[in-house]
């Protein structure tokens, strides 16, 4: 009886030893692990077509993402430090190498998302017209914010090169739209006016609503430079649209940072919108030019 029990014990130990041996051999025969897949690859099947196209172009290029270039410098105290020189921004198939001083990011998206760096930002000194700086205006810090829109839809690409061909055409079409909108509130009809604002050097097309109660007002305002046109790379003319009329008598705009925006088509797949404060409206033409020139200069040839 004892011999039978000892035999079973020996067999159990032998089985365990063999199991351990085969396990070790199996581990040794496993294939080498595959290299890590770049995090941006997870967006190849994103719901947004431009995100997919950007991810595909990044992987095809073989470049890292994010792709940031740094340089070492010595500060005034003799310490070595690093500064950002440039960072890649992708808009579908197009790569832009953005200078470090105007690199922006959108925290809504993770760092490895193609849309994370689809933004420029900075203060007016980075995009400032030649001449002495005017500093802070109306108690608000100077600001330029640049956003991008991208689409791979054929219908979007088909609109490349289409738009207002002149300031006159744009003013007339916007005036008609404002006039239609002015009739939507019968109790508080809007008044549409076109004025030559010599103080701004711009035409002001205004939709002014008297909203009732305590003298409330609501505005829609578009501005067009008197002596020039704002043209994007594809040719059409842009206007400047503001959240609120530029009022020379009202300096603080109720303490709110009202925004003026102007946009341009950058490629057949992408457009850009430039934002400044209403109080900096007169600088928009220069900022518009500088943003356009910057993006044209840093756009890389397609492979």
Image (tube, rainbow, N blue to C red):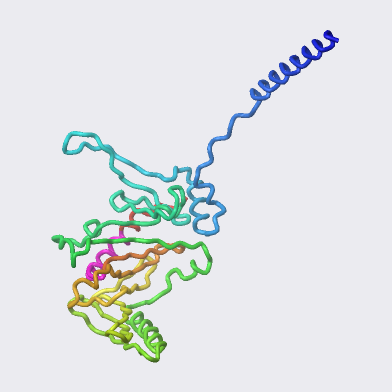
Read off the magenta span. 278-293
Q: Image point 30% across, 45% down: which residue?
A: 85
Quadrant of image for the N terminus: top right
Examine the rendered structure and indicate whether residue 141 appears above or below residue 252. Answer: above
Q: Image point 55% across, 51% down: which residue?
A: 44
Is 27 in front, or is 155? 27
**Extreme-front residue of the structure:** 1
**Extreme-bottom residue of the structure:** 186
Examine the rendered structure and indicate whether residue 220 appears above or below residue 44. Answer: below
**In the shown orientation, is residue 237 left or right of residue 78?**
right
Where's residue 201, x and y in %? 21, 76
Q: Image point 42% across, 55% down: which residue?
A: 108
Is residue 223 at all visible to an observer of this figure? yes
- Is 282 magenta? The answer is yes
Is 45 in front, or is 136? 136
Q: Image point 29% across, 75% down: which residue?
A: 244
**In the shown orientation, is residue 198 left or right of residue 28?**
left
**In the shown orientation, is residue 264 left or right of residue 55?**
left
Where's residue 165, x and y in %? 37, 77
Where's residue 81, x and y in %? 26, 37
**Extreme-left residue of the structure:** 132
Is 198 in front, or is 2? 2
């Amino acid at each position: 009886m004892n011999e039978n029990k000892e035999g079973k014990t020996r067999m159990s130990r032998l089985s365990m030893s063999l199991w351990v041996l085969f396990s070790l051999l199996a581990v040794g025969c496993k294939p080498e692990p595959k290299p890590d897949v770049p995090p941006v690859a997870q967006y190849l099947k994103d719901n947004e077509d431009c995100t997919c196209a950007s991810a595909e172009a990044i992987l095809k290029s073989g470049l890292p993402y994010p792709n940031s270039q740094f340089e070492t410098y010595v500060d005034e105290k003799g310490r070595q430090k690093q500064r950002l020189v440039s960072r890649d921004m992708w808009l579908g198939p197009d790569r832009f190498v953005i200078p470090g001083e105007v690199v922006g990011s959108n925290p809504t998206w993770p760092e490895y998302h193609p849309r994370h760096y689809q933004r420029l930002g900075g203060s007016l000194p980075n995009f400032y017209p030649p001449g002495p700086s005017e500093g802070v205006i109306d108690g608000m810090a100077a600001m330029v914010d640049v956003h991008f829109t991208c689409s791979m839809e054929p219908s979007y690409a088909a609109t490349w090169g289409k738009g207002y061909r002149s300031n006159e055409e744009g003013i007339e079409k916007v005036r008609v739209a404002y006039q239609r909108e002015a009739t939507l509130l019968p109790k508080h009809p809007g008044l549409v006016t076109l004025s030559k604002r010599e103080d701004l050097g711009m035409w002001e097309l205004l939709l002014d609503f008297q909203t009732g109660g305590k003298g409330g007002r609501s505005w829609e305002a578009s501005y067009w430079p008197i002596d020039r046109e704002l043209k994007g790379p594809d040719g059409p003319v842009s206007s400047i649209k503001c959240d609120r009329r530029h009022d020379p008598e009202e300096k603080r705009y109720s303490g709110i940072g009202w925004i003026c925006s102007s946009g341009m088509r950058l490629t057949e797949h992408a457009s850009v919108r430039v934002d400044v404060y209403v109080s900096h409206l007169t600088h928009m033409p220069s900022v518009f030019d500088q943003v356009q020139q910057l993006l044209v200069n840093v756009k890389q040839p397609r492979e």
